């Protein structure tokens, strides 16, 4: 049976690829379950310091959720599918290591929602991004409306969501949906290079910073600053902090252990 989600290791970086190229890597329940298991396996591996998430083939990152699979759903089945996908997106957002989306083609609907759940979104110049669900008579179901409003504001999120328009990588970069754009052949190497750089940092510090940014975005500024101060203090109870600062003062590379 063809592997629906592939994992390729590059040292401390794992490249995770959705692998349904004939279906433009569309997400069905089987793909979601397989992705969930692969992520759990990587989270349990202390040798993994970062993940790059992409799609196989030259046309799509993930073209969306599988419309043929969804079409016969009733309301209860659709809500279950939405909750399953949304839970996996939340899992990505809260993982201890950075997850970088390398958007190599279409990232539409559930595909864009998958990218938005990642910590950093890089895209090919050929990428096309959007949430076209209203053209199908539905709305985004994996957290897309809520993540877009946090990136674009209310009016920007409505512009993307209500129109169902598809946007270029350059427009996505301009609005902050994407952080960097590369030529197609450079995208994956650049994503791996960034992931390796982040994986070389203090892993506990990366996890704390990611957690504080994610949690702080949903509370008021004073509460968010308090979260940051507490996390800053926790860093000073780690061996990694002692090693990182000692290495800096000695002008040598730090050897972090995650302790």
Image (cartoon, rainbow, N blue to C red):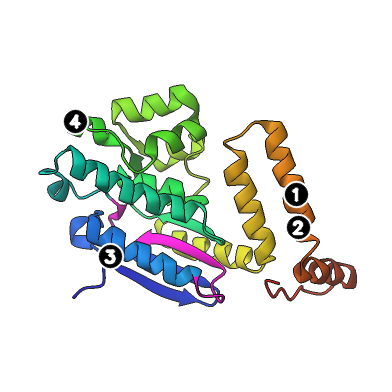
Magenta stretch? 44-62
| Residue highlighted by disc 3 | 19
Label 3 CA crowd tier, 10 Å (few <14, some 14–19, many 20+): many
Along the polypeptide, which appears first: circle 3 or circle 2?
3
Query: Is 138 covered by the magenta stretch?
Result: no
| C-alpha distance separating marks 1 and 2 | 6 Å
Residue plotted at (39% across, 34% down) = 145
| Residue highlighted by disc 4 | 137
Labels 1 and 2 touching (C-beta < 8 A)? yes
In the image, 103 versus 210, the foreground residue is 210
Q: Position of residue 211 (x, y in %)?
A: 61, 51
Q: Position of residue 41 (x, y in %)?
A: 43, 72
| C-alpha distance separating marks 4 and 2 | 48 Å
Q: Residue furthest right?
A: 249
Along the polypeptide, which appears first: circle 1 or circle 3?
3
Residue plotted at (42% across, 28% down) = 157
Q: Quick check: 90 above or below 153? A: below
Relative horizontal placement of residue 30, taking residue 259 as reference (left or right): left
Q: Which mark is residue 230?
A: 1
| Residue highlighted by disc 2 | 234
């Amino acid at each position: 049976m063809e592997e629906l989600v592939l994992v390729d290791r590059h040292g401390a970086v794992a490249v995770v690829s959705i692998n349904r190229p004939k279906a433009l890597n569309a997400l069905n329940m089987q793909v979601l379950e397989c992705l969930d298991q692969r992520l759990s396996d990587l989270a349990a591996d202390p040798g993994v310091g970062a993940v790059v998430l992409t799609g196989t083939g030259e046309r799509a990152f993930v073209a969306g959720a599988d419309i043929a699979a969804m079409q016969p759903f009733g309301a209860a089945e659709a809500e279950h599918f939405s909750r399953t996908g949304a839970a996996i997106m939340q899992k990505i957002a809260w993982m201890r290591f950075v997850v970088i989306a390398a958007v190599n083609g279409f990232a539409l609907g559930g595909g864009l929602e998958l990218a938005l759940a990642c910590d950093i979104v890089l895209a090919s110049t050929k990428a096309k991004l959007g949430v076209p669900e209203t053209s199908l008579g539905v709305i985004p179901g994996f957290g897309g409306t809520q993540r877009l409003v946090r990136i674009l504001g209310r009016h920007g999120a409505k512009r993307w969501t209500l129109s169902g328009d598809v946007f270029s990588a350059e427009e996505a970069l301009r609005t902050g949906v994407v952080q960097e754009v590369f030529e197609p052949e450079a995208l994956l190497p650049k994503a791996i290079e960034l992931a390796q750089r982040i994986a070389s940092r203090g892993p506990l510090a990366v996890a704390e910073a990611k957690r504080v940014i994610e949690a702080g975005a949903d509370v008021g500024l004073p509460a968010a600053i308090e979260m940051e101060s507490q996390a800053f203090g926790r860093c000073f109870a780690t061996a990694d902090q002692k090693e990182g600062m000692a290495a800096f003062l000695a002008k040598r590379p730090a050897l972090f252990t995650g302790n």
